[in-house]
Amino acid sequence: MTNYLLLYRADPEAMAAMPQPTPEEGAAMMEAWNAWAARAGDALLDFGNPTIAVSPGADRSVGGYSQIQAEDFAAAERLLEGHPHSMMGGTIDVYEITPISM
């Protein structure tokens, strides 16, 4: 099995221009994320958290991360089908985590 880091990206200006979600909209978004997590099951190693760029030069389009495990990249892609971040117009970068051998 291979571990993958997912970086959630969205245009920072577009995100800033979006109105704050109502409590109902926020609950629906969280429900969609929880439904994805349930569908991913044991493949979801770390649900992750939102991120905010703070260092000079940091990519402000990265808004969060998760970590999954899959047989290969194709299987990882299948886990991302219908992902709520993509459904909201964002993109997901997938990075294979490669262990360091000493």
Image (spheres, helix red, strand yellow):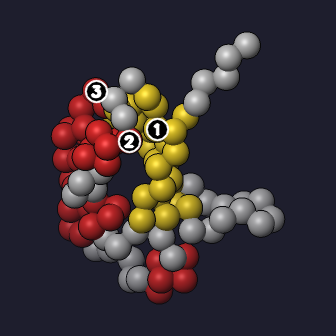
Tags 3 and 2 in contact by the CB under 8 Å rule? no
Q: Are marks 1 and 3 in contact (CB under 8 Å)?
A: no
The residue closer to the viewer here, 40 or 19, is 40
In the image, residue 91 above or below residue 46? below
For image coordinates 21% across by 38% down, the residue present is 38
For badge 1, the amino acid type reads Tyr
Q: Name the spot of residue 79 as percent of width and height, x first.
A: 27, 44
Residue in the foreground of this view, choosing between 40 and 55:
40
Q: Residue 62: x and y, percent?
A: 56, 61
Q: Are marks 2 and 1 in contact (CB under 8 Å)?
A: yes
| Residue kind at label 3, given as amino acid type | Asp
**Which residue is drawn at the image coordinates 67% and 22% (left, top)?**
100
Secondary element type, mark 2: helix
Residue 84 sits in which quadrant? bottom left
Q: Looking at the rendering, in which quadrant would you find the C terminus? A: top right
Residue type at tag 2: Phe
Question: Of the residues under marks 3 and 2, which one precedes in the sequence?
Answer: 3
Locate residue 83, reporting x and y percent: 27, 56
Numbered label attached to residue 42: 3
Q: Is residue 27 visible?
A: no
Outermost residue toward the right in this view: 56
Residue that lies at the very extreme toward the top in this rendered image:
102
Q: CA distance from mark 1 to mark 3?
A: 13 Å
Residue with the mark numbered 2: 73
Labels 2 and 1: the sequence-earlier one:
1
Disc ID at residue 4: 1
Q: Quadrant of the N terminus?
A: top left
The image quadrant that residue 75 belongs to is top left
Residue 66 % position (x, y): 44, 43
Q: Mark 1 or 3 closer to N-term? A: 1
